[in-house]
C-alpha cells in the first residue's frame, strides 16, 4: 500500500523560498503523476500542481510564476519549491498521488494523500 | 472564491439523509469532467470518498453516494452517523485553468 510523507521546514521567512519533499513508500514513483495541494488554516483546498515521474509538470496558473515541482526517481521522492513567500502562503501542504487513468488528468482524482505538514510564513 | 460552489454547512440528525451540492460551470462539471468527493475529519488529511462521479473506493460504506447532472454534482449520505461529522470537498477539472479545482468545502454537523 502506497504511503506518502511530507518533510521540510515548518517556518519560513517572508520573501524566502519554501521547500518541501514528499517521500513515497510501498510502491514506485514511476508511471504515476504526483501532486501538491495546500490548505490555509481554517480554509479550503487549493491545487498547486503536479508532476509526472518523467518530469513533465502542470501548475496552478495563480502560483505558476513562483512554483517549481521536481522529481527524484532514484530516491522515490518529489519536491515543491515556492518562491517569494508571504503570510498568505501559510498553510498545511499535502502531497498526493494522482489516481485514475495515467495522463487523463481531466478525469483524475487524488489518492492517497500524505498526512500534511504545516508551513508558517513569519519573520 | 472557489471555482466550484458548495454550501458552507449542512446538518442532520442521526439516521437522517443529507445532501451536499457542488455547483460548477461549462468549463468544468458542465464540460463533462468527472467530480470526486473527499471527507476530511478534524485534524486529518482529506480521504477519497467518491471518484468518477459515483464510484466508491473499497472500504467506503454504501451510505455514501454521488451523482452528477449538468453543471452540478451531489453527495448524499444516508443513515447519518456521528462519525460522519467532517468537512466534505468536491473536486473536478477546469479547462479554463487547465488544472484541478476544489469546492470551498461543506461542514457537516450531526445534531
Image (cartoon, rainbow, N blue to C red):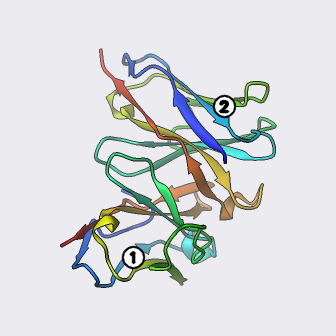
Relative to A82, A2 lies left or right: right
* Residue appearing at x 79%, y 25% in the figure: A74
How many marks the image carries: the answer is 2
Tell me if mark 2 has few (under 14), some (14-19) or many (20+) residues whose alpha carbon lies within 10 angstroms of its own.
many
Tell me if mark 1 has few (under 14), some (14-19) or many (20+) residues whose alpha carbon lies within 10 angstroms of its own.
many
Secondary structure, mark 1, is: strand
Q: In this rendering, is residue A103 above or below A19?
A: below
- Relative depth, front residue between B15 and B36: B15
> Would you say residue B97 is visible in this rendering?
no
Q: In this rendering, is residue A61 above or below A91?
A: below
* Residue appearing at x 77%, y 55% in the figure: A103
Indicate the position of residue B71 as horizontal and vertical percent values: 51, 79
User: In the rendered image, which quarter is residue B9 located in?
Assistant: bottom left
User: In the rendered image, which quarter is residue B36 located in?
Assistant: bottom right
Give the number of the mark in front: 2 or 1: 2
* Residue appearing at x 50%, y 73% in the figure: B25
Q: In this rendering, is residue B82 above or below A91?
A: below
Indicate the position of residue A9 as horizontal and vertical percent values: 45, 19
Secondary structure, mark 2, is: strand
Disc 2 with disc 1 on a shared chain = no
The quadrant of the picture occupied by the C terminus of chain A is top left
Contact (Cβ within 8 Å) of mark 2 with mark 1? no
User: In the rendered image, which quarter is residue A64 located in?
Assistant: top right
Residue A81 - label: none
Please give the chain letter of the residue carrying mark 1. Answer: B
Residue on which disc 2 sits: A78
Relative to B100, A121 lies left or right: left
Residue on which disc 1 sits: B21
Relative to B26, B82 lies left or right: left
> Would you say residue B100 is visible in this rendering?
yes
Mark 2 → mark 1, Cα distance in angstroms: 34 Å
Amino acid at each position: 500500500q502506497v504511503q506518502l510523507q511530507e518533510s521540510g521546514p515548518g517556518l519560513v521567512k517572508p520573501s524566502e523560498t519554501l521547500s518541501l519533499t514528499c517521500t513515497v513508500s510501498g510502491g514506485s514513483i514511476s508511471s504515476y503523476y504526483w501532486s501538491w495541494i495546500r490548505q490555509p488554516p481554517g480554509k479550503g483546498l487549493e491545487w498547486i500542481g503536479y508532476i509526472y515521474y518523467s518530469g513533465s509538470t502542470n501548475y496552478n496558473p495563480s502560483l505558476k510564476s513562483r512554483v517549481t515541482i521536481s522529481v527524484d526517481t532514484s530516491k522515490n521522492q518529489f519536491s515543491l519549491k515556492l518562491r517569494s513567500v508571504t503570510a498568505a502562503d501559510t498553510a498545511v501542504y499535502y502531497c498526493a498521488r494522482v489516481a485514475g487513468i495515467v495522463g487523463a488528468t481531466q478525469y483524475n482524482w487524488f489518492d492517497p494523500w500524505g498526512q500534511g505538514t504545516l508551513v508558517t510564513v513569519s519573520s | 472564491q472557489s471555482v466550484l460552489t458548495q454550501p458552507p454547512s449542512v446538518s442532520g440528525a442521526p439516521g437522517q439523509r443529507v445532501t451536499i451540492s457542488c455547483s460548477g460551470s461549462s468549463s468544468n462539471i458542465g464540460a463533462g469532467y468527472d467530480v470526486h468527493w473527499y471527507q476530511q475529519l478534524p485534524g486529518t488529511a482529506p480521504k477519497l470518498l467518491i471518484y468518477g462521479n459515483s464510484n466508491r473506493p473499497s472500504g467506503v460504506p454504501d451510505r455514501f453516494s454521488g451523482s452528477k447532472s449538468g453543471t452540478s454534482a451531489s453527495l448524499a449520505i444516508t443513515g447519518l452517523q456521528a462519525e460522519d461529522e467532517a468537512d466534505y470537498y468536491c473536486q473536478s477539472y477546469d479547462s479554463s485553468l487547465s488544472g484541478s479545482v476544489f469546492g470551498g468545502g461543506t461542514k457537516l454537523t450531526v445534531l
